[in-house]
Amino acid sequence: MDQNSNKTAINSSTSTFYCRIAPNFSWEDRGSAFHLVLGLVSIMASFPTIILNGSVILAIKRKKELQKPSNIILSSLDVTDLLAGVTVMPTSAAIDFFTFRQVSFESICMLYAVNLFFFSLLVGATMHHLTIITWER
């Protein structure tokens, strides 16, 4: 068996796609289960993120003795983390599942652009809250 023929067979089985909406995003189709595992981990982490941040917000809202300025700032940080658990993590998991199932790359590209927008927005809000917490202490 010739090495060159084996190499061309390997190269012809993989495809690389580029997103015109987000030029830095490319997707190489290798047929691996990495995207499936990554999507499952993201979904499994999403539920505790939502439940735990929601319970902290409710606890601070309902308990009068917890309504101190430092806890209210922490509660606002929990709101941004809750939004990340509701929007960014499931969208990221959907991108991974679509990549694994080899769904239309245009759909994956659009979801990636939306996810990138919300991710950037929530990371900025989280950094803002962490700066306020640091300044307050």
Image (cartoon, rainbow, N blue to C red):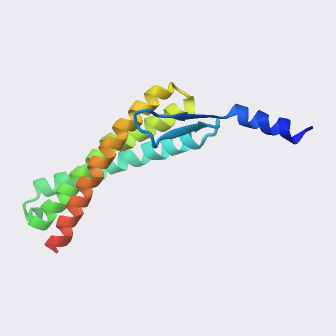
Q: Nearer the viewer, residue 59 or 134?
A: 134
Tell me where residue 22 sits by quadrant.
top left
Image side of residue 4 versus residue 36, left or right: right
Image side of residue 95 versus residue 62, left or right: right
Q: Position of residue 82 (x, y in %)?
A: 27, 48
User: Which residue is located at x 55 percent, y 33 percent?
Assistant: 17
Tell me where residue 7 sits by quadrant.
top right
> Relative to 12, is 33 above or below?
below
- Image quarter hosting the C terminus: bottom left
Q: Position of residue 12 (x, y in %)?
A: 72, 32
Q: Position of residue 49 (x, y in %)?
A: 33, 50
User: Which residue is located at x 27 percent, y 47 percent?
Assistant: 121
Image side of residue 68 versus residue 110, left or right: left
From this viewpoint, which residue is outermost toward the top?
104
- Image quarter hosting the N terminus: top right
Q: Is residue 74 visible to us here? A: yes
